Amino acid sequence: MEGFILLEDGSLFKGKGFGFRGTVLGEAVFQTAMVGYQEILTDPSYAGQMVTMTYPHMGNYGVNPEDVESRQPKLKGFLVRQASSIASNWRARGTLNSYLQEHGVVGLMEVDTRAVTRHIRSRGAMKALLSNENLDADDAARRLEEYAGIDVEDLTAQVSCRKPYSFHYDPKEESALFRATLRPGRVCRRTLHVVAVDYGLKENILRNLLLRGCEVTVIPAYSPVRDLVALNPDGVFLSNGPGNPEMASRALPLVRYAAEHYPTFGICFGHQLLALAFNGRTYKLPFGHRGANHPVKNLEGGRVEITSQNHGFAVSRDHFPEDFVETHRNLNDGTVEGMKHTRLNVFSVQYHPEASPGPHDSLYLFDEFIRRIEDGPDD
């Protein structure tokens, strides 16, 4: 079946449909990782987006139930140059095509992903319509013009859990390679209870906390403060999530309370919500940061980390949150990548230290979270 992606500026890129057959509206973005497509598909931070993979060959190692980051994909569409019809890996339990079909993800292959990426890099992320069914061009243009876009949607409400739950995980069930890769540098001296607030979290975050000896309870994004207090946590984790953080303003009272009463660690969307909760501001990046090769400098120690990133918004340095200082900076464009409070036991980063399949330069941040819970922040 033929297919196409139509961008809001009128640009149209043709390809061949695969995966689920349908038509969807969302935001067109690109991702530069060479591997990890299953983790990308199941990362809730991609809710509402159509992801173009810049690496040309996808699907060669198939899909399996061990590498998912959530129960099912939340993204709108998936664009690739070549999609392998053969899954060449002993862990594979299906093909990329069958996985997209099973989970209702509209796909487009044999599209010029290089041209799509270059266009987005020069014009910015934009609204788009993706179709791999028989859709009239005029109808497609009309539907796209009427679409408001994801920046005015509360995507957090769409991806967050509906009720609290305890996350249980047995590291013995994972491969030796997985355990060696995520081997913690610090394990709790006693069992610590961490409450993770779910704005669209990835399960590998929770695995990293459990590997360090924590018990983890996950609560919905818009939980009342009393629910957090009733759980009596040793620390609070603010997760990643999709879209515009200003659309999740209902989360700010809990974020502020957590930061003022418990050791708190935020990543990505949680990092942005922390800034908003302390009167900072966020803004939309031209085309976002999405890939596994972004260099970030730790301003406190001078070390450069290669990081995995997935976000379209950033914390404004010109309107920085009250009583926070910048700790990490993006070496590509100079944007804020991390911060900590000057008095409270609170810190956050914009990137993903838990990234699977990698890189793993930033796993130390989970060790730092445990240290801060047990010993407090540095003076």
Image (cartoon, rainbow, N blue to C red):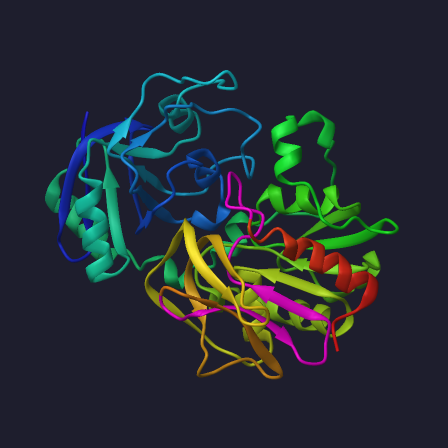
The x, y position of residue 245, in whole percent, is 49, 65
The x, y position of residue 111, in whole percent, is 19, 36
Magenta stretch, main secondary structure class: loop
| 43 sits to left or right of 133 | right
**First to last magenta residue range:** 333-360
Residue at 73% in and 27% down? 172
In the image, 162 versus 123, the foreground residue is 123
Residue at 40% in and 18% down? 87
Residue 351 forms part of the magenta stretch: yes
Vertical relation: 231 (above or below) 355? below
Vertical relation: 1 (above or below) 309? above
**Res 174 seen here:** yes
Vertical relation: 44 (above or below) 225? above
Q: Residue furthest right?
A: 190
**Res 165 seen here:** no
> Which quadrant of the rendered structure holds the N terminus?
top left
> Which quadrant of the rendered structure holds the C terminus?
bottom right
